[in-house]
Image (cartoon, rainbow, N blue to C red):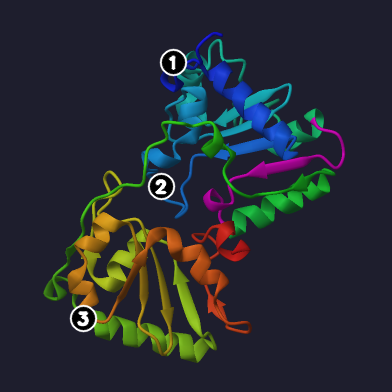
Amino acid sequence: MQAATPPNNLTAKDRIEQLRGIMQRSGIEAWIVHISDPHMSEYVPDRWQGLKWLTGFTGSAGTLVVCQHAAALWTDGRYFLQADKQLAGSGIQLMRDGQPGTPSMVDFLGQQLPAGARVGCDAQCISMQAARRLEQQLKDAGLVFQAGRDLLDKIWLDRPGLPAQPLWQFPDELDGSSLPQRLAQLRLHLQRDGHDALLLSNLADIAWLLGFRGRDIECNPVALAYLLVAAEQPPELFLCQAARNSAAFLAEQGVSLRDYADIFARLADLPAGLVLQLDPTSCSLASVQA
């Protein structure tokens, strides 16, 4: 028996074919890969660089669509030459976004798929707002949107783990207010607007509100985190372990520290009828699927 090809030696064609096998077994006719993470960050950690891993394309903007018999990548004019070189021999068609004659992603899917076909993506890496828009566009094209767990988990065997960097306290005197003051202001707004709790996913918002800085994302002083703030309970901060180990200064101020991976189970446990405020542009679709 021939030994399996090591993950690092697979070509883009090999990886696309592996994805197609998982799609077929999952009942998905097309899979969309965005350059995005669960917090809709502009700079994306290596763990969520699935488009780069699948295709070899290293640009910062792009969307990949994989069907059983076709694959295409949309990117903008900054990357036309780069993508043309990096996609060579992959079987992936380059779609020059914004150029005459270039079909939209939904038009391409409509051409490739039969009516009623299911189109999926990672529900953690698409915002609620973008998911609603895409779902309607696909519906208009006679297709079904089915976002869920990331299919790449089943084939990306050497996928990077979560960033694991410590965080540190940002001085109140530089911020202009203290953590208790900021939380009190936030809770006043929640009460005024008739909300029982707030879910924050935007990493810069969380770092500012709680008064810390991190280094989980290159060029950004933030840490991977979710924050749940209720009107009458301690705020709950969901962090990776390395960050939790350095966050004693937050625990001392009444912040409950929890594991990053626990956020969706926590959202599922929220009481029925609780009015949760969130930002549909920065919270993922998975946040409301929990």
Asked if residue 253 is positioned above or below residue 206 in the image, the reply reads below
Q: Which residue is mark 1?
A: 9
> Alpha-carbon neighbours of circle 1 within 10 Å: few (<14), some, or many (≥20)?
few
For this orientation, the residue located farthest to the front is: 1
Residue 42, label in figure: 2
Which element carries disc 2, helix, strand or loop? loop
Query: Is 121 inside the magenta-drawn segment?
Result: yes
The total of numbered circles placed on residues is 3
> Alpha-carbon neighbours of circle 3 within 10 Å: few (<14), some, or many (≥20)?
some
Check whether the beta carbons of the residues at disc 2 and disc 1 lie within 8 A of each other: no
**In the visual, does 77 lie left or right of 42?**
right
Asked if residue 48 is positioned above or below residue 77 in the image, the reply reads below
**In the visual, does 21 lie left or right of 42?**
right
Residue 122 visible to the viewer: yes
> Alpha-carbon neighbours of circle 2 within 10 Å: few (<14), some, or many (≥20)?
few
| Range drawn in magenta | 113-127
Which element carries disc 3, helix, strand or loop? loop
Which element carries disc 1, helix, strand or loop? helix
Return the disc, 3 or 1, that comes first in the chain's sequence.
1
Alpha carbons under labels 3 and 1: distance apart = 51 Å
Q: Position of residue 58 (x, y in %)?
A: 42, 27
Asked if residue 78 is positioned above or below residue 287 in the image, the reply reads above
Q: Position of residue 18 (x, y in %)?
A: 60, 25
Residue 178, label in figure: 3
Question: Which residue is pictured at 87% across the width and 39% down the height?
Answer: 115
Q: Amino acid at mark 1?
A: Asn
| Rendered-image quadrant of the N terminus | top right
Q: Position of residue 79 (x, y in %)?
A: 47, 26
Question: Which residue is pictured at 55% across the width and 23% down the height?
Answer: 15
